[in-house]
Image (spheres, rainbow, N blue to C red):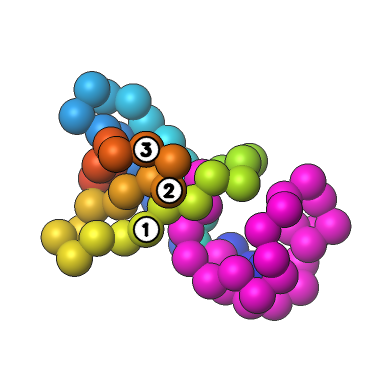
Amino acid sequence: MKITEVITVKNAAGKALTLQHLVPGITYLDYGFTHLPRDFNGYRVKDTDRTAVKQSNGTFKLSDSSDLYKAA
């Protein structure tokens, strides 16, 4: 997995997260602690295995939460 973009996002309560856009490729991420598949293409929360999906309105929804985050 290669990181192509890093975005800081915040939810309505002000909680900030750093998202990394990952695309297929081999880097140090493939040998670390991530359990995402090597061909993963999408956004993940930095230093975790939590993922986020970009919504049509430009916000991000975490896979394990109903909170919406927008770019800070």
Q: Earlier in the sequence, mark 2 or mark 1?
A: 1
Q: Badge 2 is on which residue?
A: 63
Residue projecting furthest to the left: 57
Provide the residue span drawn in magenta: 22-45
The amino acid pointed to by label 2 is Ser
Q: Residues within 10 Å of mark 3 (few under 14, many from 20)?
A: few
Which element is circle 1 on?
strand
The amino acid pointed to by label 3 is Ser
Tell me the number on the disc at residue 33: none
Q: Badge 3 is on which residue?
A: 65
The amino acid pointed to by label 1 is Val
Residue projecting furthest to the right: 31
Residue projecting furthest to the top: 13
The image quarter containing residue 8 is top left
Q: Residues within 10 Å of mark 1 (few under 14, many from 20)?
A: some
| x, y percent for residue 18 | 46, 42
Residues at discs 2 and 1 in contact (Cβ within 8 Å): yes
Q: Badge 1 is on which residue?
A: 53
Which element is circle 3 on?
loop
Question: Would you say residue 4 is visible in this rendering?
Answer: no
Cα distance between the residues tagged 3 and 2: 6 Å
The image quarter containing residue 16 is top left
Name the residue rendered at 67%, 58% in the picture. Answer: 36
Q: Is residue 31 above or below residue 33?
A: below
Name the residue rendered at 65%, 75% in the picture. Answer: 39
- Quadrant assignment for the C terminus: top left
Q: Does residue 26 show up magenta in the picture?
A: yes
Which element is circle 2 on?
loop
